[in-house]
Image (cartoon, rainbow, N blue to C red):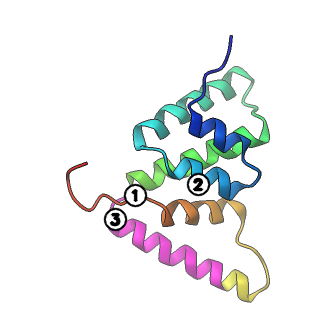
Amino acid sequence: QDQQQPGAVAAASAAQDWRSSAAAVAALKPAAITEARERLQKAAAAQGNTLPPNHRLVLNLLEHAAFVAALPPDSITEAKKELRAAAAVATVNGVALPPERAQMLYMLEHAVVETSGHE
């Protein structure tokens, strides 16, 4: 049985760093994010909730993307401000933002915010 993955998920899984993976995920439409997320969750469940690290990363990014897609624009703006402030504090302290937070910030910054009711 060959596992079919949409091109963006395959690209995200093959990427060398999380930012490249995040860019591939951020380019997906909400329906594709949901579909890919469900597919990876099923794959994980079938494997006793274990996934290769690159697939786990993609699943995390898809979950961040789905979360961001569900936020109203004001909340996205607010969350970006909070995470940027945290990133600035981390930088001043000479540390990096934890990967989960850095990934969420990336997704917030690259979110396609619906400014009107039509596609």
Instruction: State which tag comes first along the sequence, 3 or 2.
Output: 2
Circle 1: element type: loop
Farthest top residue? 1
> Which residue is rendered at x = 56% and y = 45% of the image?
62
Image-based side of 42 in relation to 46, left or right: left
Q: Residue 92, position in %: x, y?
A: 72, 89
Extent of the magenta region: 71-88
Label 3: state its secondary structure.
Answer: helix
Left or right of 116? Residue 100 is right
Q: Label 2 to label 1, Cα distance in Å?
A: 12 Å
Tag 2, which secondary structure?
Answer: helix
Which x, y percent locates residue 14? 73, 41
Which residue position is annotated with label 3? 73
Q: Marks 3 and 2, Cα distance to the nearest angstrom?
A: 20 Å
**Of the residues shown, which amino acid type is indicated by label 1?**
Val
The amino acid type, in three-letter code, at marker 2 is: Ala
User: Which quarter of the figure has residue 54?
Assistant: top right
Q: Residue at x 60, y 49 (%)?
A: 61
119 with respect to 76 (left or right): left
Task: Please name the residue that numbered disc 1 is placed on.
Answer: 112
Task: Decide if residue 80 is on the left or right side of residue 87.
Answer: left
| Image height of 1 relative to 91, above or below | above
Q: Nearer the viewer, mark 3 or mark 2?
A: 2
For label 2, the residue is 23
